[in-house]
């Protein structure tokens, strides 16, 4: 289905044509007509499927018919990075329209407060905000949502995961009861349904294929000891100039620093990003990565959702994520918009059961690759499937054919 089939405003169609969009994704096909019709929406679709366009294009179509600058739309998101990304897309979609949007998020210097306050009180159609910073403004009493018509909660499951449930309810207490509410989530646990039952009115529910990496992602895994991980990464990316955009996910901020240090020693162009950086520093790091000035970016899960960096060649899970769903979000950073990409996971002897849960979720057994011979032997891959009674029923093994031992490689 093409975007001009939805009957959208011609200026919006002109803008998205300039942006290179022609064919709608599945979630866009499902939700745009219902949103244009004024329905509340509960939609589930994984990262990278075009959710921002799914909710913003019909909202912009409504706003295109109004000749005012009232604050009519509020988009609430879990992270500042996602707020920035959505606002950039809004500005692209509305390029030929007389519509304004502003971001409200923490981590900036005090000079942004006045600009945010002005945007929240006059002269802006759309606000894209993180919960904490928005509540800081709401607490001072000058924010008026009396003309708000559209409320969007994007990455709702992520907001609940990081503890924003009460903040969301607090924000909702300030917005009019008569509004259109659009709730988008990458997963649909019971807590999301419970929240939806409180804030949506007769919603239309849509769901695309959940928790499956895109078809264009080539998935594989190395079974390694911890001290073999850096050498494996170096062997993967050495002398491969075509891999010019590589994203490495780590479980902790401390490990990010260690990985960056080790990869720099091997001569790689690499930077790290985590919540320890100030917002301006994070934006600068992302800009260098987007422009290919930095080849390797090492990140915590702050980047696993909501960051639209095009044409990432290779995703490396340095640590197997604790949540099977987070694996899908990490892997979703590559092979976006029908492109192809590679996702490699490094599985140590302590993470095999976690990776087994991932394979069950995605309903696919990921290819296990032996550690390169020169790096020593890796562990045997084995998991303990459980019977219905919870007792182990056996083992599923993978071995390179060499006897497992600790190997001799050193990452330090």
Image (tube, rainbow, N blue to C red):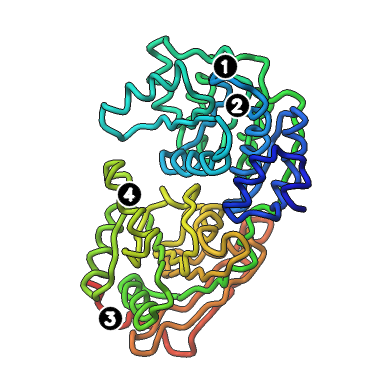
Which type of secondary structure does the marked residue at label 4 adopt?
loop
Quadrant of the rendering where the C terminus is positioned: bottom left
- Nearest to N terminus: mark 3 or mark 4: 4
Are circles 2 and 1 on residues that touch, CB within 8 Å? yes
- Nearest to N terminus: mark 2 or mark 4: 2
Instruction: Compute the Cα span from label 4 to label 1.
Output: 33 Å
How packed mark 3 is, by other alpha carbons closer than 10 Å (few <14, some 14-19, many 20 or more), is some
- Nearest to N terminus: mark 1 or mark 3: 1
Are circles 1 and 3 on residues that touch, CB within 8 Å? no
Residue 354 visible in the picture: no
Residue 261: x and y, percent?
22, 65
The numbered dot on residue 175 is 1
Are circles 2 and 4 on residues that touch, CB within 8 Å? no
Left or right, 385 with reference to 81: right
Position of 34 relative to 245 (above/below) = above
> Which of labels 1 and 3 is toward the front?
1
How packed mark 4 is, by other alpha carbons closer than 10 Å (few <14, some 14-19, many 20 or more), is many
The numbered dot on residue 151 is 2
> Which of labels 3 and 4 is toward the front?
4
The numbered dot on residue 274 is 4
Are circles 4 and 1 on residues that touch, CB within 8 Å? no
Residue 270: x and y, percent?
29, 65
> Which of labels 3 and 2 is toward the front?
2
How packed mark 1 is, by other alpha carbons closer than 10 Å (few <14, some 14-19, many 20 or more), is some
Which type of secondary structure does the marked residue at label 3 adopt?
loop
Residue displayed at 56% across by 52% down: 325
- Based on the displayed image, in which of its 4 quarters is residue 387 positioned? bottom right
Judging depth in this view, the residue of 15 and 405 nearest the camera is 15
Q: Which residue is mark 3?
A: 409
């Amino acid at each position: 289905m093409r975007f001009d089939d939805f009957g959208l405003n011609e200026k919006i169609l002109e803008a998205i044509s300039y942006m290179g969009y022609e064919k709608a994704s599945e979630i866009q096909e499902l939700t745009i007509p219902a949103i244009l019709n004024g329905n509340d929406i509960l939609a589930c679709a994984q990262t990278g499927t075009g959710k921002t366009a799914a909710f913003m294009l019909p909202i912009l179509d409504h706003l295109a018919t109004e000749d005012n600058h009232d604050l009519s739309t509020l988009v609430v998101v879990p992270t500042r990075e996602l707020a920035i990304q959505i606002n950039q897309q809004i500005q692209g979609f509305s390029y030929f329209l007389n519509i304004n949007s502003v971001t409200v998020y923490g981590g900036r210097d005090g000079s942004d407060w006045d600009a945010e306050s002005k945007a929240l009180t006059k002269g802006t159609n759309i606000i894209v905000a993180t919960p904490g910073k928005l509540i800081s403004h709401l607490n001072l009493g000058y924010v008026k949502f009396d003309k708000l018509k559209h409320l969007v909660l994007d990455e709702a499951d992520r907001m609940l995961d990081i503890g924003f449930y009460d903040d969301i309810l607090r924000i909702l207490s300030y917005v009019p009861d008569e509004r259109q509410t659009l709730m988008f989530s990458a997963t649909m646990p019971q807590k999301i349904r419970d929240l939806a039952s409180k804030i949506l009115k007769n919603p239309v529910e849509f769901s695309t294929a959940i928790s499956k990496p895109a078809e264009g992602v080539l998935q594989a895994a190395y079974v390694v000891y911890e001290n073999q991980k850096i050498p494996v990464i170096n062997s993967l990316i050495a002398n491969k100039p075509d891999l010019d955009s590589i994203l490495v996910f780590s479980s902790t901020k401390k490990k990010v620093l260690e990985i960056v240090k080790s990869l720099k020693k091997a001569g790689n162009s690499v930077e790290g990003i985590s919540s320890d950086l100030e917002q301006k520093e994070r934006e600068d790091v992302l800009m260098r990565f987007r422009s290919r000035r930095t080849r390797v970016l090492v990140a915590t899960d702050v980047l696993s959702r909501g960051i639209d960096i095009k044409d990432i060649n290779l995703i490396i899970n340095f640590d197997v994520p604790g949540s099977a769903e987070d694996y899908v979000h990490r892997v979703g950073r590559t092979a976006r918009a029908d492109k192809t990409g590679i996702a490699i996971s490094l599985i140590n002897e302590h993470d095999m059961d976690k990776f087994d849960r991932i394979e069950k979720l995605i309903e696919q057994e990921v290819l296990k690759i032996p550690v390169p011979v020169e790096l020593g032997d890796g562990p045997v891959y084995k998991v303990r499937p459980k019977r219905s009674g919870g007792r182990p029923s056996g083992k599923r093994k993978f071995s390179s054919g060499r006897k497992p031992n600790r190997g001799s490689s050193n990452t330090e």
